[in-house]
Amino acid sequence: MVTASISLRDVGRTFGATRALAGIGLDLKPGVIGLLGPNGAGKTTLLRLLATALPPTQGQVSVLGLDPQVPAERTGIRRQLGYLPQEIGFPRGFTAFAFVDYIALLKEWTEPAARHAEVRRVLGLVGLPDLGPKRIRAMSGGQRRRVALAQALLGSPLVLILDEPTTGVDPEQRVTLRTVLAEIARTSIVVLSTHQTEDVAALCERVIVLDRGRIRYDGPVTDLVGQAAGRVWLADEPDPAAKVSWRTGTGRYRNVGTRLRDDVEHVEPSLEDAYLLLRGGSAENEPAGEAAS
Amino acid sequence: MTGWHLDDDALRRYVERTDSLAEGASVEQHLLSCEQCRGRVNPAVDVIDLAAVWGRTRDTVEVPRPSVFERLLRAAGLPAHDARLVAVASAFRGGWLVSVVAVLGFAALAAAVGHARGMWLFLAVAPIVPCLVVASSYDPWLDPALEPELVTPYPMLRLILLRTIAVLALALPAVLLFGLVVHGEAPFAWLLPAVGFVAVVLAASTWVSPLRAAIAVSTVWLAVVWLLAARSGSPDAVLQARAQAGFLALAAASFGIFLVRRRWLHQLRPWR
């Protein structure tokens, strides 16, 4: 049995004069790995590299011990790969069943009975067991997203690359999907990019934060959250000493700052606090045309 | 209790529902009164795989019915899964095919009744329709699921070639059809330019999007036809053997470039 592994060595990707990724080095093992970062940080480009949809312009990528640059090895990787792109369109007039069945055909499920059973299995996993005959156009945004996720789960892949899988999905279904992904991650590498820090906190043991095409943090979620300990506090007014502050539902202000404070009402930091702290908490850190998604 | 019993053949026909109405009624009547034969019925019935039955039942509800085009491809000998992969392209579904046939039909009609000017219209339109259909069969603008399709093990080269062959196979019956209304060599003269333009689009799509390539090819062809029509007024320039050989050479060279650059089909390109 193949043990799932991915390694990237000094990987970079440019689009013309635009540098999307630079100096990326990673070793990934089975488990759920969260990918966080602002828009344009290079998350989608990194996921496309891992999914063999894009080649790097610099460095070495190895997926399951295979080189995606070699055609036969790339096909070998794709046999063990599930990929949910950030944006996915559906052919006009397709039902949920027809779409997943179509991708299953491309994934070499040629025997109809086995293929149809597999399509039903993955539609069941994403909570759409009875919506196979429904036209995708008539579905809600969250249901469409789950149909898209279903095609990525076909064949229980060893490598699952998910770009914002829970966008538009309701909280109940997100919890269900977390359970499904956690089960898959027992033997597979699941890399998910998201803006939902609560998904990462609930699901991932490891988080990678990208900023302007470079890795800003790579380590356990708990360590990242620990960096914010003592740096998050509540106050009646926005604190000028804070890097970022916002009014909460109770009417008080949650402040996140870089300096340790003793004279304030500290609260337990969340992953979102830690992420904002890492990012510096201001729009001045947004990439300006250097990196691309 | 009766003195006779069902023989094995009659019992088999009964449980398989292959008996006649009269025989079935007779067996039913006998079973009501014969405990011994009733006891033989249950073991004679095959074990029913309920999961398989349920799977088939769901198939009838969930599995989309193959389109006419898909059934044609299967009848032509293409394996069922390949036929499905070809037929799902937007270019081969409903409105697209109808509009393509309508455009060609209109051009053929114009050629049939409009003499030289109609012939020019036919020669201008007919060769570019196949390359537009081929381009639309794998262009990301019309095929929005390209990204997940791309990272499957199915070779993109094979998919594109299958769809291309399907377009050209559709063109042949069209030639025969138009030959009925358009006289002379024109109904056949558009074939080689069409093949050449399809090959150019395939080759160019390793650099730019297929639809852009097809639009560029079509624009150039329309300009050339317009210039020729304005200069000579006769479509002979397109019909002569030298021009036809040129289109053949264009097709061969372009297809060669397409094969050499095929690796670009297996990844997203900047134009995405």
Image (cartoon, coloured by chain):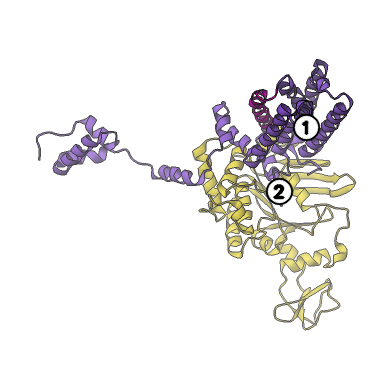
Chain colours: A yellow, B purple
Q: Which residues are magenta?
A: B160-182
Above or below, B268 relative to A167: above
Mark 1 residue element: helix
Above or below, B215 relative to A246: above
Q: Residue furthest top?
A: B241
Q: Chain of mark 1?
A: B
Whether residue A5 is visible, yes or no, is no
Name the residue at 38% across, 42% down: B49
Rendered image quadrant of residue B196? top right
| Residue B12 percent coordinates (x, y) | 26, 33
| Residue B74 percent coordinates (x, y) | 55, 30
What amino acid type should be assigned to the residue bearing mark 1? Answer: Val
Q: Number of marks in the image?
A: 2
**Is residue B170 inside the magenta stretch?**
yes
Front: mark 1 or 2: 1
What amino acid type should be assigned to the residue bearing mark 2? Answer: Leu
Residue at image mark 1:
B201
Q: In this image, B145 relative to A293: left or right?
A: left
Rendered image quadrant of residue B179? top right
A283 and B72: which one is in front? B72
For the N terminus of chain B, which image quadrant? top left
| Residue B41 percent coordinates (x, y) | 23, 39
Give the numbered dot on residue B38: none
Name the residue at 53% across, 49% down: A133
| Residue A215 percent coordinates (x, y) | 81, 54
The answer as to whether the residues below labels 1 and 2 share one chain is no
Give the numbered dot on residue A28: 2
